[in-house]
Image: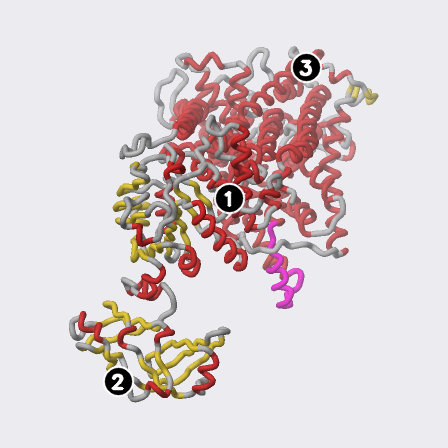
Amino acid sequence: MPGTATAALRTSPDMLLARAALWAAAALFLVALVLPMAVLLLRAVEDQSGAFVGLANFAAYVATPSLAASVWNSAWTSALSTAIVVPLAFAYAYALTRSCVPLKGLFRAAMLIPILAPTLLPALAMVTLFGNQGLFRPWLPEGFSVYGPWGIVAAQVFANFPHAAIILSVALATADARLYEAATVLRAGRLRIFLTVTLPGATYGLVSAAVVAFTLAITDFGIPKVVGGNFNVLATDVYKQVVGQQNFNMGAVVGLVLLAPAVVGFLLERWAQRQRAATLSGRAVAYVPAPRLARDAPLLLLALLVAGVLVGIVAVAAWSSLITFWPWNLSLTLANYDFGRFDADGWGSVATSVQMAAFAALIGTPLIFIVAYLLERGPSQGPLGAALRLAVTMPLAIPGLVLGLAYILFFNHPANPAGVLYGTLAILVLNSIIHFYTVAHLTATTAIRQLDPEFESVGASLKVPLWTTFARVTAPISLPAIIDVAVYVFVNAMTTVSAVIFLYGPGTKTASVAVVHMDEAGQQSAAAAMACVILLITATAKLLQLAAAGWVERATQRWRSR
Amino acid sequence: MSVATTRPHAVGSGAAQAAAPYLSVEGVGKSFGRFAALSDVSLHVAAGEFVCFLGPSGCGKTTLLRAIAGLDPPSAGRIVQAGRDITGLPPAARDFGIVFQSYALFPNLSVGDNVGYGLRGRAWPRQRRTGRVKELLDLVGLADQIEKFPAQLSGGQQQRVALARALAPEPGLLLLDEPLSALDAIVRHSLRAELRGLQRRLGITSIMVTHDQEEAMAIADRIVVMRDGRVEQSGTAEDLYDRPATAFVAGFIGRSTAFDAVAEGDAIRTADGHLLPCPAAFGFPRGETLRVFLRPEHLAFGPDISGQPGAFAARVAAVEFHGGLCRVSLEDRRLRLEAEAPPDRLRALGIVPGAEVPVLLPPARLRLFRA
């Protein structure tokens, strides 16, 4: 080779492979996200026969009083639940990060319980407690009904509490002790320090928490389905239009109306995230609270109360699932867990859910991590990278119902060769991966960004291919994050209703959909039992992750110890 | 192809021009959008030579190193290594080892695995690989640390491991990107000498990027001073110090007194009207504004100066004690001068702040540049 003065190959084989992988990921997002959403848009401006009608469907939507009323109903119930959740979550997060309350680990665990359950579970518990034959019925005022806004708001406070509390704990945990010392030295009182240091530091966290709580509330389907009664909201409207009236065009219109707040919320959240990142200084000294009874005692009381309610609601659901015949025969039985008596699929729907969630985790995790790695450390990408970066953030802005609807419209189209997927487990898995992609991608990206940016350069200078460095260094170091991603995808795929309610077929009904069906059939105890089974499975997955943490630590993180 | 076997022994900078250069950079440019990080950079590195790229931050020195490594390929020009045009080659197809400021050691691999990371394939059967890893760790004095993880080592030890890892596959060229900057002063000094010794012994052609001129002067055969993406001057430390080619180099390398003056035949006139003899001013048209540089150790002062042509009295503004040498700040109206002398001499001359002392700017020592 010496003497030849030609720049033969510009790209090494590993870079070619990396580029091919990125193209494959882009193709996947085209088929599984962009095209379905495009078809959804298209269907909103067509009539039933497929002719272009412009905005006629939107005009019809606005002119239908019951549909237009749903917008207002969705807006005010979501706003109310947000207004309750955010201050409550702030106080709870404050107790966890800025006080010396004992049992912080337990409180943290209790805070996460609602995430592990489908939103149907708190809704069913509300019915058990405050329903027409509820436990507290005798003490409730005449004419009060849990079916409607009150039930929706109460169940949503439970379901969305952990999301707000997690964001606020992170926001409050990153405080600069120097600011507090400076304020104290300048003789500011406690209230003044709280108003001038603590609150401003948490402002963007509060914005994020509020936006997330509101978006989750307005896009949730399970809660209004169970306790909504005749109180119409956007999410149940989509379902009624599609499943009840088979009016896909109007369903698409309502779906787009539902998409609007989700997209606005998504953009607001990203703005708040950026602002928050800008306020963090690398030289901050961590704030460590000192014990103070006047602050710690009330916070402990509050934390006990909140954690008690969170655990209590799950306990109520579990208890109601064991009741023989509500409310006349309160003796305990396991008969409600004999799902074959209530639903044709019986325990089969649980198996379907576990399969779907496991495949989504097993296929989705490597996909998500490798794409994140290539976007961060791969070859220079130009427009392909920019397009893919946009595509991976989009799912967060798309409510599950809207994505599910887009999937039926796209995959069920007679001209689509991918239509064979419709009604199979494969489409459920694909939908789950895309639906929960963004958060998992961000987790992976954060882990990868913590690695030295020169690892790949060192590998290349030593003539080691990119994939070897990935397998020997990047993946082992990031194993905890990879497991996080897998468990996240698994848990969410287990609990979701909205994304799969349109997509299951004969033999692929999921456990969460079975809960909806049993509830519709008036089998509340069996529905609660199925919701508890889901919770047990997700909780087991989470506990396995914790148990595996020790093993993972020894196997791949030994180098961290000094 | 193995450069390792044909590598000649270390040669001084004098031989650099004689032999065909090992590495040639010809008219290399690199732009990021509209910003030109490098423009028309050309330089040659002889086999076995140790070259430093020196310059303030943002001068393009790291960009040039990364272009040579193929990590950020240049947008213009040609890079030839050992007779082979490597301009467009990916890093893996080139022949170099690199050490980064951050070390970039793989934290989950042991010291031995890190050093052996590049020793793969048929050329490196297990036995040869373990032997080579041992050899290199011996070379950097860390043979007893082979089982440890990087986090268990000190910064200086980590940098040695990074060096051993870069050298393990016997590259023809060693690239060092601010390798000592993350270390504290004492370790930096000892590691600097060690690095130089190792390079001499192995005779490996090396390029180091640094912003520390003392480091560059101590270690390099030749220094390439860069500024705004261009090469200002290239030469030995003595060349740069005694014969700076530009005002930037004169001001950047070493300490200097600097002031503006106007050329007047065989003399220069300062802003305050001092007429200082200076034959070098002949090279400039009368009336041209010049930037004048004088090293502190060249400023003459004391009673024996008075009466000589061009001598005048200056007031002592401050005296800084630096151990073996003191730094004296002198001023006469707007002209500020700096001098250096041992403390004993200052005491003998009675030089204390506020004192008046005759000074002389030796004509032959003045360096003149167009302002």
The circle on residue A377 is: none
The circle on residue B309 is: 2
Give the prevailing secondary structure in the magenta stretch.
helix
Image quadrant where one finds the N terminus of chain B: top left
Element under disc 2: loop
Q: Position of residue A3 (x, y in %)?
A: 28, 34
Nearer the observer: mark 2 or 3; the answer is 2
> Which residue: 61% across, 53% down?
A175
Q: Nearer the viewer, residue A213 or B130?
A: B130
Residue type marked 3: Trp
Residue type marked 1: Ala
Q: Are marks 1 and 3 on the same chain?
A: no
Q: Position of residue A280 (x, y in %)?
A: 54, 52
Residues under numbered marks 1 and 3 in contact, where contact means CB atoms less than 8 Å apart: no
> Disc 3 designates what residue?
A347
Q: Nearer the viewer, residue B368 or A421?
A: B368
Q: Colour mode?
A: secondary structure
Q: Chain of mark 1?
A: B
Above or below, B183 relative to B370: above
- Whether residue A269 is visible: no
Image quadrant where one finds the C terminus of chain B: bottom left
Residues under numbered marks 2 and 3 in contact, where contact means CB atoms less than 8 Å apart: no
Above or below, A212 relative to A244: below
Quote the CA–CA distance across marks 1 and 3: 57 Å
The circle on residue B162 is: 1
